[in-house]
Amino acid sequence: MLRRLVSRLFWKCSRWTLKTEPAPSEPTVLIGAPHTSNWDFVLMLAISWRLGIDVRWLGKSSLFAGWRGPIMRSMGGIPVDRADPTRVVTDVVTQVKAGEVFGLVVTPDGTRRGHTHWKSGFYRIARETGMPVTLGYVDRTTMTTGLGPTLVLTGDISADMNRIRDFYGDKSGLRPQNRIEPRLRDEAEQA
């Protein structure tokens, strides 16, 4: 209740406009892209709280150190040990099979700069759990943010990524210079 109230106030005062397709009613991998600024996190919380979506999000384990840990976990954070990222897939699969309904927010661009490809974890999680992928976005050129379509991945990485690239093709992110083209290294391996 408090979260929805805070989000309503945020959207009323914000320069951003929330545009969204219907909120997912089943577990989904929710892509947050282009991830070009730490402000994307605030927008993601405002979107999920406004739409009443229970979200979990993946973050590097250092974000959960010390006093920040309980705060980050209370907002849905799941620490990722970069030395063992496959454990996260197992944990998420277990939660989905237990019947939990949530959106798992993943930012495949990684740490907002210095990368040439998206990280493939969102794709592996979606395929292993059978969860669809919902395309969340931030677009500075139109000052809009929200949720786009929900896709079921086919396993044909190139075809699936073409659909994702088509959606994100005109989205710039808050800091356009940090935008990474939606492309997985696995695309070249599959071809």
Image (cartoon, helix red, strand yellow):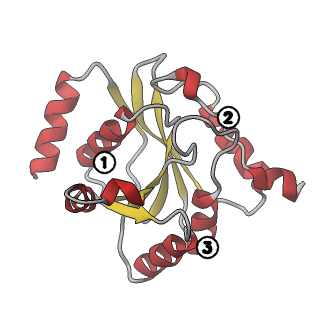
Mark 2: few/some/many CA within 10 Å (<14, 14-19, 20+):
some
Q: Is residue 119 left or right of residue 172?
A: right
Mark 1: few/some/many CA within 10 Å (<14, 14-19, 20+):
many
Could you say whether the residue bearing mark 1 is in a helix, strand or loop? Answer: helix
Q: Are marks 2 and 1 in contact (CB under 8 Å)?
A: no
Label 2 vs label 1: CA separation? 25 Å
> Of residues 107 and 81, which is closer to you in this image?
81
**Residue shown at the point (11%, 42%) measured from the top left:** 5
Mark 2 or mark 3, earlier in chain:
3
Identify the amino acid type marked 3. Glu
Q: Nearer the viewer, mark 2 or mark 3?
A: 2
Q: Which numbered dot is residue 128?
A: 3
Residue position for label 2: 181
Q: Residue furthest right?
A: 191
Could you say whether the residue bearing mark 2 is in a helix, strand or loop? Answer: loop
Q: Which numbered dot is residue 81?
A: none
Q: Is residue 148 left or right of residue 160?
A: left
**Residue shown at the point (59%, 29%) measured from the top left:** 179
Q: Residue furthest front?
A: 66
Q: Are marks 1 and 3 in contact (CB under 8 Å)?
A: no
Residue position for label 1: 48
Instruction: Give the x, y percent position of residue 70.
Output: 21, 62
Locate the C terminus and report the quarter of the image it occupies: bottom right
**Residue shown at the point (49%, 37%) measured from the top left:** 35
